[in-house]
Image: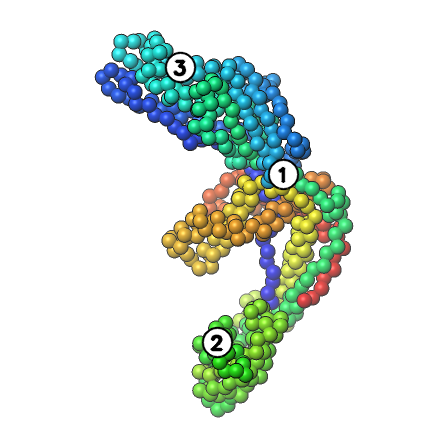
Amino acid sequence: MELCCVCVNIKPKIPTFTFTFTFTHHYSFSNNLHASSSKSLSFGYLSNFKITTKPHHKLSCVSRQVKSKNPKRRASSPPPAVAGESKLERLPADLKVTEAPEPNSRIRLTVEVPEKVCSDSYRKVIAQLMKTAEIRGFQRGKVPEDILIRHVGEKEIQQATIESVLKRTLPHSMSALTDKALRDSVRIVSRFPDMLRTYSTQKSFSYDIVVDVAPEIKWISEDAYKNLKIVVEIDSDVNAQVAADQEFRRRHKSLGVMKIVTDRGLEIGDVAVLDISATTDEEDETKVEKIPAAESKGFHFDTEDSDKLLPGFLESISGMKHGETKTFPLAFPDSWKQEHLRGVRAKFTVECKELFYRDLPELDDSLAEKLLPGCTTLQQVKELLLLKYQEAEENAREQATDNAILDQLCKMVEIDIPQSVFEEQGRQLYGSTLLQIQANMKLSEEQLASLSSPKAVKEYLEGQKDNIQKVIKQNMAVGDIFKRENLGFSSAELMKEVENSIAEFKRHKQEYDEERVKDQVQEIMEGAKVLEWLREHAEIQCVTR
C-alpha cells in the first residue's frame, strides 16, 4: 500500500532579526600622515553597522500595513525615549523621507539629507581625523584643517562624510518601518558615486532605500475558510485489509527457500528472471521504434506482484519454460502512469533466463514468532498487522484531507509575496530536498557542492516558483486563521513538545538553538490546531480514485 506523505511547512519562519548594513565602499588613504613613513587610514563607517528591529516572528500577526497607493512625505525626528529601546542619535535637522509602495510588498524610501546634517557629519569626520592624525611639526589634535585636508585628500574626506551621514541617518529613515520590515531585506539602492557627486557640489544629497515588509493577506471573502467543501481523493490501493494480507504473505514468503523449476512452465507463485525488450507495434515496419522505458535485462519478476505490471503481461508469459522466448502484443492503458506511453500499442519480446519456485513452510502457530516477534498465534499476527495498516490508512486519509484543505486555502487568498520571503522559503525547501537526496544516495562532497551552488539554487527557485508561492500562501493563510479564530494551547503543552524535540537533538548528538526549536515547535502546533479546526468546520467527502 502506498501512502501519501507530504511535508507541509505550516508558517513562514520569520524570527527575531537584526538588519546589517554593510556598505560596499571601504576607503583607505595612504597620504603621508607621518613625515617619516606612510600609514594607511581606513574609514569603513558602515562596516557591521546594525539596526535592531522589534521582535517580529509571524507575518500573520502584523497589523500595520502600507495601504496608501500614493507616496506620502513625513518628517523624521527622534522619537521620545522609551524604556528598553535604543535611543536614536539626535540630528541637527530633520530628514525628509518620502515613502512609496512598490510591487511584491516592497517600500521605497527616498531620504533627503539637509545641509546641516551633512555639515555636522563633516565636522565629526574632521574631529576624528584630528585625534588620530600624526603629522610632523604639529601636535595630535592641533593640525590645521586645511593641512589635514591636503594630506588626507578632499575627495576621501567627502567619501568618509557620506558614510558617516548614512550611518547616522539610516536608523532615522527606518524608524517607522522597523516593526514590520523583514529580515535581511533592506538595501541602499542609490549609487555611491552619484551621492558623492551631489554632495561635492551641493553639500547635501539624497539616497534611496528599498525594504520588504510583511505582506497583507486578502481573503476572497471574510468567512471564506469557515464553510469549506472538500472532496478528498483516496488512492484505491489505500486499503488496510489488503495491505495487511499482502504484508502477511510477504513475511511468509521470506521464510521460504528458492528452488529451480525443472519440469514445468511458469505458474503463479513463481519468480522468474526475464530479459524484456519492446518496440512499437506498427503495420509499417519502417516506423517501428524501440520503447526504452519498457525494456529491462535480468528483471526479477514475482508473479504475485503482476498487478504492478502492464495488464495482460502475466497471462502472455504463463507457461514459459527456462530458456524459452515469447513475442506478443500489448497496449498501454490510457491510465498508465507514464504519460508518453498511454495508448501506445507495443510488441514485447521476453526471454526466460531463470525460473524458481518457493518451498514455503506450512502455516501454523509455530511460525507466529518468526512472522512477527512476540506473537504466539497466526491470528495474533494477522490482527496486529491489520491494526498497523488501519492506523496507516487513517493517517493517509488525514494527510490527504489536510492537503486538500491547504489547496483550497491557497485559492482563497491574495498575497503580494516579498522577494525575500520567496527566496527564504525556496531555500528551505531546496535544503530539505538536498537532505533527502543525501540520505537516499550518499552524495560525494563534489556532488553536494555542485547541488549547493548559487546557480543550482537559482535554477531551483525559478523551476519551483509556483510551488514555492503556493506553500507561502498556505502558510500565511493558516497563520491568519489561527489569529482570527483565537486558537491556542497552554504553555505547558508547548514546553512539553519543546523538551521532547530537544531530547531528540541530544539523543542524536546534534547541535540546536533552543529559541529556534521553540519557534518551530510553536509553528507546528499552531498549524495543527488550525487544520483540526478546519476539519471540524468543513464539509468533507472522500472518493476513491
Image height of 438 relative to 321, above or below:
above
Kind of residue at badge 1: Pro
Q: Quadrant of the N terminus?
A: bottom right
Question: What residue is rendered at 28% in x and 21% in y?
Answer: 39
**Earlier sequence position, callout 1 versus callout 3:** 3
For the residue labelled by badge 2, is the local secondary structure a helix, a strand or a loop? loop
Kind of residue at badge 2: Lys
Q: Could you tell me if residue 58 is visible in this image?
A: no
Q: Local crowd at mark 2 within 10 Å, few (<14), some, or many (≥20)? A: some
Residue furthest toward the front?
201
Which numbered marker is on residue 126?
3
For the residue labelled by badge 1, is the local secondary structure a helix, a strand or a loop? loop
Number of numbered discs overlaid on the protein picture = 3
For the residue labelled by badge 3, is the local secondary structure a helix, a strand or a loop? helix
Which numbered marker is on residue 290?
2
Give the image quarter of residue 105: top right
Q: Which residue is mark 1?
A: 215
Q: Position of residue 77 (x, y in %)?
A: 58, 19
Question: What residue is rendered at 53% in x and 18% in y?
Answer: 114
